[in-house]
Amino acid sequence: MNSKASQQLQVPPGQKVRLADYSTDTFEGSAALDKEQVKQATEQLQQRLSELQEKLYAEGKQSLLIILQARDGGGKDSTVSRVMGAFNPNGVHVANFKAPTDLELQHDFLWRIHQQVPSHGMIAVFNRSHYEDVLVTRVHGLIDDARAQQNLEHIVNFEKLLSDAGTRIVKFYLHLSPEEQKARMEDRLNDPAKHWKFNPSDLKDRALWHEYTAAYEDALATSRSYAPWYIIPADRKWLRDYLISEILVQTLEEMNPQFPTAHFEAADYPIEDIPSK
């Protein structure tokens, strides 16, 4: 990705943004992009992601945490399959955070999150995350604004702790328009094979669109240099996949993982042929 596009999509550290200022289907300079060419470029990026992940896994000294947040129908699941599918399953872990269990409710809200962060050499993908505790809980009145702000402060400190321990964090908000969300919901309703993807409660959240917008804008203010937020235009899936792939390649290249140096001379270990019986 060119630096100009990257800067457009990244939320400035510590600043609050207006989602209305960000497009859901384009960014400056993308209008001339050809869909098929972008798909080919995405495939090349996927190959590069695979190469970089192998080095990260072999090195075993640092880790990457990828956070995906979006409204219902925003494309989190398809992002996991289309983009994260480039990774070797041995080196990646996907965590889905749904409503907390009774046991999890007996601890602080980050307790269940900390158990899923990646160990050295690994990549973790959070399909929803600790940000649910300043989004859903706030919009539905389970916590008040003061508690939400307190939780946001805890999140910033938590992510700094992970960063200091060698975990790079990159956070993606998949920015979906209400029109595209409606189209995707209708597609699920009209196709029996997709009924399992539809939850009637999604309509209740859709009715709270503006309340979620305000909550997301506060959450996005947790963008930091060590844990940046990127607002990804998500109405066009092929563009979404390209942008996320490009940012992940850029992030891993900055991490610069290296294959470990062997502590032996390869020439000292000739591989003998197995004699036939």
Image: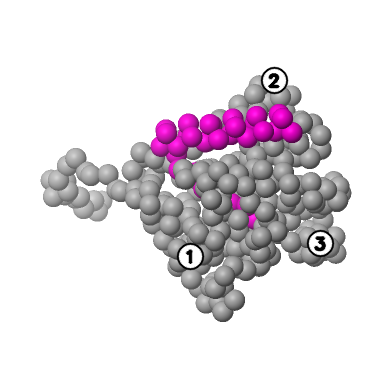
* Residue 146 image point, x, y percent: 72, 30
Report how far apart the C-alphas of labels 1 and 2 lie in the structure: 45 Å
Report how far apart the C-alphas of labels 2 and 3 lie in the structure: 37 Å
* Dot 2 alpha-carbon crowd within 10 angstroms: few under 14, some 14 to 19, many 20 or more: few
Q: Going from the N terminus, do you reach mark 2 or mark 3 first?
A: 2
Does residue 214 sit above or below 241 in this rendering?
A: above
Q: Residue at x 48, y 55 (%)?
A: 248
* Dot 1 alpha-carbon crowd within 10 angstroms: few under 14, some 14 to 19, many 20 or more: few
- Circle 1 SS class: helix
Residue extending farthest to the left is 268
Does residue 156 sit above or below 237 in this rendering?
A: above
Q: Which residue position is annotated with label 3? A: 182
Residue 215 lies in magenta, yes or no?
Answer: no
Name the side, left or right, on which 181 lies relative to 272. Answer: right
Question: Between 1 and 84, which is closer to the camera in this rendering?
Answer: 1
- Asked if the residue under mark 2 is in contact with the one under mark 1, i.e. CB atoms within 8 Å, the reply is no
What's under tag 1, amino acid-wise?
Lys
* Residue 106 - label: 2
Q: Which residue position is annotated with label 1? A: 4
What's under tag 2, amino acid-wise?
Gln
Name the side, left or right, on which 175 lies relative to 47. Answer: right
Q: Residue at x 38, y 52 (%)?
A: 254
* Residue 86 image point, x, y percent: 49, 57
Residue 160 lies in magenta, yes or no?
Answer: yes
- Magenta range: 145-174
Does residue 200 sit above or below 8 in this rendering?
A: above
Name the side, left or right, on which 218 lies relative to 120. Answer: right
* Residue 24 image point, x, y percent: 67, 63
